Amino acid sequence: MPRRDSVAGPVTVGSDRARAVRRRLRDRARTSVDAVEQLVGGLGTSLLSLAVFLLLLLVGLACLVGVGLWLVPSAAKAVRSAADRERARLSLARDLPAPPRVPGELRGVLRDPWTRREGAFVAVHATIGFGLGVLGLSLPISAVQYLLFPLYFWMLPPDEGGPGVVIWRIDGLPDALVVALLGVGWLAATVTLGPPMARLQALPGRRLLAPPRDVDTSLRIAELTATRAAALDAHAVELRRIERSLHDGAQNRLVAVTVLLGAARRAVVRDPAQAAEILDRAQQSAELALAELRAVVRGILPPVLDDRGLTGALDGLAVGCPVPCTVEVDVPGRCAASVEATAYFVVAEALTNVARHSGATTAAVTVHRRDDRLRLRVDDDGRGGADEGAGSGIGGIRRRVEAHDGRFTLTSPPGGPTTLLVELPCGS
């Protein structure tokens, strides 16, 4: 036995390290892919900003002769259009509230702080954002081009060299493999530089398109007031559900038990056999009442969260889902009980919708914690077209999430796939 323990210990530690390394590599790959996607999206909005910036230059030149003054309100609307596209792109990571309507007269445009901030954003994003987007797109393209060069080098004349900066003669596979090694360098540059470039590209939008401090505070107060009202409404709905469950289920069962016990007491003297039968019925009603009480308690706070934690609870939901479902949870430690209960409710309701309405063949649940935020994602390959107003429980998910001051996003185009994103403050 001692010898077996001495062998099992290092094996377990080694397997844990291997899993940790695989997790880090997977996270790094996912972060790099997301960064490239963000850079490409920023490139699209920077092209629009570039067109608007050129329009502003033309209007500015026209203002020198007085003609462009009439075009300033229209140019401000074009600036707002470009800024709104960037707001829509950044809202995937952070909700940016929409500004008020663009003033229709020249004096209002010149005095509007929103218009000045948006004009500065257009100038920065059309130049720096465009350059970062082009560079962010060229890095992975160059990496793929270099890495795959050994597969197609024979189709090119040797004197033409290879892709990009490779201008020397390629005389065979060894030279092509050297080019592929350069592709590894491009891939490393993509992984290393992609995320900071994406953050730098998004920085002007986050700084300049966000509302001024006093406006942001007012909007935040309004948002918290609305979420507080939603929390109270959700609490009232939950109390009504519990009361209805107790009244329609356990209470009726217990009343039936009381009636049957009275009937059994009266029948003891007259017909003991009938009294025994009545007592059996009373026992069955009592057991049903107890089962319904347990179901109500599980609906308030599932005991499986206390017994097995969030990971075990979500694994149990995946096992019980009729659609094959994978679960990946990376949540070190425990979150607040209310946050775990909300995450459990969201996954349970989402998987129920997947099984009933989506027609999906697979589903995936991903939960991870970053700093003080719990991020939850549910994907399925179904037919899409999920509608919050169709009574599918999506509205209940949104209310439950917003009651915790969280964020809820649903992407479900017709034809699928459907992606549900939830972000919750973890609490302590």
Image (tube, rainbow, N blue to C red):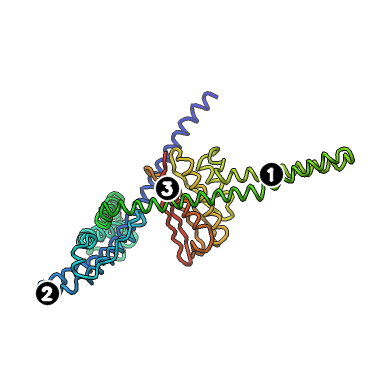
User: Residue shown at 61%/51% (left/top)?
Assistant: 244
Q: Residues within 10 Å of mark 1 (few under 14, many from 20)?
A: many
User: Local crowd at mark 2 within 10 Å, few (<14), some, or many (≥20)?
Assistant: few
Counting labels gives 3
Determine which residue is flagged by label 3.
Answer: 424
The residue to which callout 2 is attached is: 66
Q: Earlier in the sequence, mark 1 or mark 3?
A: 1
Mark 3 burial class by Cα count in 10 Å: few <14, some 14-19, many 20+: many
* Residue 415 image position (x, y, % from top left): 48, 66
Q: Quadrant of residue 95?
A: bottom left
Q: Residue at x 31, y 66 (%)?
A: 155
Q: CA distance from mark 1 to mark 2?
A: 83 Å
CA–CA distance in space, label 3 to label 2: 53 Å
User: Which residue type carries mark 1?
Assistant: Ala
Q: Is residue 307 left or right of residue 171?
A: right
Q: Residue at x 58, y 44 (%)?
A: 298
Q: Position of residue 258 (x, y in %)?
A: 75, 42
Label 2 is placed on what type of residue?
Answer: Gly
The disc label shown at residue 289, or none: 1
Q: Quadrant of residue 411?
A: bottom left
Residue, far right:
270
22 sits left or right of 380 in the view? left
Sequence-wise, the earlier of marks 1 and 2 is 2
**Mark 2: which secondary structure?**
loop
The picture quadrant where one finds residue 421 is bottom left
Which residue sits at x=52%, y=50%? 236
